[in-house]
Image (cartoon, grey):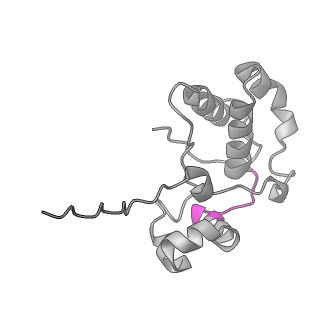
């Protein structure tokens, strides 16, 4: 009896970093939000954990910096720039259909288990509820 040839694996690994939507912090409107106003607060919370600092900074700029009106806007910007997203979803329309809450400033903070995601969520939520919310801005932050 002849041996069957081994089947090739059809699974392709997905690199999450290639599919994460990047926030362009240079688009931040400093009249609406200036991260340097809250930098000391953020530094106290995170200590030497630079990855938490970066996650908080980018999230706050995304939410309060006035650069984006919705996650759809961020999605369009990233679709044009990231070949991996284009290859995975084919068309921009198909990609944008996959975004949750497309008409809102929504998103997910991707951090590995045990890296302090709760610190990041706390810093952003307290900033929104406390005195850190930029003047004249309103909204609701729902950490889930």
Figure label count = 0
Residue 52 image offset from top left, x and y in percent: 68, 31
Question: Does the stretch in magenta take in 72?
Answer: yes
Q: Quadrant of residue 141?
A: top right
Query: Camera-side residue: 138 or 36?
Result: 36
Identify the residue at the far left of this view: 1
Query: Camera-side residue: 47 or 7?
Result: 7
Residue 103 appears left or right of 45: left
The answer to whether residue 53 is above or below residue 104 is above
Query: Camera-side residue: 31 or 113?
Result: 113
> Looking at the figure, which quarter contains the C terminus?
top left
The answer to whether residue 107 is above or below residue 39 is below
Residue 91 image offset from top left, x and y in percent: 53, 80
The answer to whether residue 43 is above or below residue 70 is above
Residue 94 appears left or right of 123: left
Residue shown at 58% from the left, 58% from the top: 19
Residue shown at 64% from the left, 35% from the top: 124
Residue shown at 69% from the left, 61% from the top: 68
Identify the residue at the far front of this view: 1
Query: Camera-side residue: 62 or 115?
Result: 115
Q: Which residues are magenta?
A: 65-74
Question: Does the stretch in magenta take in 11?
Answer: no
> Looking at the figure, which quarter contains the N terminus?
bottom left
Residue 132 image offset from top left, x and y in percent: 74, 34
Q: Quadrant of residue 111?
A: top right
- Main SS type for the magenta part? loop
Residue shown at 53% from the left, 24% from the top: 114
Residue 13 appears left or right of 115: left
């Amino acid at each position: 009896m002849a041996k069957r040839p081994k089947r090739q694996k059809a699974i392709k690994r997905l690199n999450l970093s290639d599919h994460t939507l990047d926030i362009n912090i240079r688009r931040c409107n400093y009249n609406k939000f200036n991260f340097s106003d809250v930098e000391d607060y953020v530094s106290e919370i995170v200590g030497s954990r630079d990855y938490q600092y970066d996650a908080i900074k980018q999230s706050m700029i995304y939410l309060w910096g006035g650069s984006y009106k919705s996650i759809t806007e961020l999605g369009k910007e990233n679709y044009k720039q990231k070949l991996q997203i284009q290859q995975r979803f084919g068309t921009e329309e198909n990609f944008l259909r996959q975004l949750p809450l497309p008409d809102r400033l929504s998103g997910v903070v991707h951090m590995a288990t045990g890296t302090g995601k709760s610190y990041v969520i706390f810093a952003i939520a307290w900033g929104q509820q406390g005195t850190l919310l930029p003047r004249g801005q309103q909204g609701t932050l729902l950490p889930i």
